[in-house]
Amino acid sequence: MKKLRKIAAWLLVTVFAMVLMADFLAPASYETQFRESPSASPSQGHPLGTDELGRDRLSRLLHGSRISLLLAPAAAFLTALVAGLVGGVAGYLGGRLERMAMGLTDLFLSLPWFFLLITVRATLPLNVSPLVSVLITFALLGLLGWAASARVVCAGARALRNADFILQARACGCPRARLLLRHVLPNLRPVLLAQFWISIPVFILGEANLGLLGLGVSEPLPSWGNLLRGLESFSTLGFNPSILAPLALLVVVVSCFQLILSREDLPS
Amino acid sequence: MWIRLAARHLATIVVIVLLGGFLGATLTRIAPGFGVDERELDVRLGEESLQAIRKSRNEGRNIFVFYGRYLTGLFRGELGESRALNRPVAELFAERIPVTLQSVALGLLGGWLLGLAFALPTAVYRMWYYDLFTTVLSGALLCVPSAVLALLFVFTGAPARLAIALVVFPKVFRYVRNLLVDTSTAPHVITATAKGLGKTRILLWHVFPAAAPQILALVGVSVSLAFGASIPIEVICDSPGIGQLAWQAALSRDLPLLVNLTVLVGIVTLLANCASEVATTAFTLQTR
């Protein structure tokens, strides 16, 4: 298992390095149209062929992977931050504040996550520039995915509330804010880190689902979500199997994230 | 005790649904484009009709008035009208709820049956190759977006409900498998094994009852999971259910319909969670 985790980590590092160097590795820009060769099969000039609009598939895959792979961790960081703040403060202070915070998490958890996502997405402008659509999509993922993590963090903070070192610090007259920032939150770091890692594959899949339904990142910017829309022309698979490349890469990356997470990190 | 427990759960559901509906209505109110009505551009409408449209729109400007009216309408069974589809929401719900409930119920049944069928042999026989196969299978399904699964079902001509089952299965399998394996190492199970009890008897009499409360707790979560998965699956498979309606409402920014959908889906998932919690409590009390 340890070996598998190492392989997964190396694979992830390789994919990350490749997408970071997308500008150098990609044969063309993600939006350049080769109008003379739309829906072309793989060739030397276009290793994965071109899409219906004549755009190089490899370039779009590399740039799309960069967007999904860099912004999903950013959204996960946002989630961990909100969860740490809500769960950490509520769990540490307890009482009415904890009940209120947990009520709020119940409210968020009462709706299926994807339903909540499309409901809130619908209330925001749909006809926006591609860059804004990227920011909206990942900010929403980050801001709506905190509830489950906050519950876990709250339980961790609650356990710390009566820990010996906290009681001692309190007895020494340590102010509440200092206690929270210097003693409680640093001790919640492992929990927050686990929640951060757990959220990344969830957000990658969430963006892919949103993109496939046309509510994610808008064209011409590529992302795994809108690249997967190429699968809708499944009948051309025999002619150009490279349309499966985004799905294959997504499965590899999400599997690597799942493998890296040890069983103890996974929510029970 | 049961009455108190049920009342507490019911009160929680009512408060959460009311708050959820209020939040939905607030989002509707602050959404860009609120108050803009395409009908005002219709040159066939006279001044009186336009005034009526503006009046009805202005009535909804105050969020408390809007939500208060919505709630009173709700108690009378009036859910308003969908702006995008120009049909009463109640009528749309009556048509679409059975479709989604049926596919979610069958998906849940399929997912749970598959999950349990794959997890039980892992806990009983501990064959590494079988464990590897099931782990890889469930892991692969966990890594595929539900919309892609739906696409595969469309191309193979398989029923959409099976796609929901395949979304639920890996979560159920992994949770149940880990739980059963953990419970199998409990001291009372080791004692039972040492005393020479059969594997099936140990599983049915000692492992399963100990793990049952936690397994029951997953039922509520899986309902929410299945409802979430039903959205992309119904959209891709063109199944006229609540998921497809939510997507249509989102794309056409039919916000009143979205508020109704929020309340409806909230009630269903909360009731499922409540039922699973009550069942867990009942089971725990009975086994004590």
Image: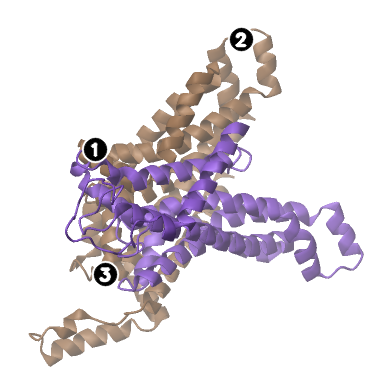
Quadrant of residue B90 in the image? bottom left
Report the disc number at residue B197: 2
* Disc 2 and disc 1 on one polypeptide chain: yes
The amino acid pointed to by label 1 is Pro
Neighbourhood count class around disc 2 (C-alpha, 10 Å): few under 14, some 14–19, many 20 upward: few
Quadrant the N terminus of chain A occupies: top right
Which tint was used for chain A? purple
Q: Position of residue A241 (x, y in %)?
A: 26, 41
Nearer the observer: mark 2 or 3; the answer is 2
Chain painted brown: B
In front of the other: B222 or B71: B222
Q: Which residue is mark 1?
A: B159
Q: Chain of mark 3?
A: B
Whether residue A268 is visible here, answered yes or no, is: no
Q: Which residue is mark 3?
A: B80
Q: CA distance from mark 2 to mark 1?
A: 43 Å
Q: Chain of mark 1?
A: B
How is the rendered protein coloured? by chain
Q: Chain of mark 2?
A: B
Q: Position of residue B234 (x, y in %)?
A: 27, 49
Nearer the observer: mark 2 or 1; the answer is 1
In front of the other: A67 or B276: A67
Quadrant of residue B167 in the image? top left
Is B53 above or below relative to A57?
Answer: below
Question: Of callouts 2 and 1, which one flags the residue occurring earlier in the amino acid sequence?
Answer: 1
Question: Of callouts 1 and 3, which one flags the residue occurring earlier in the amino acid sequence?
Answer: 3
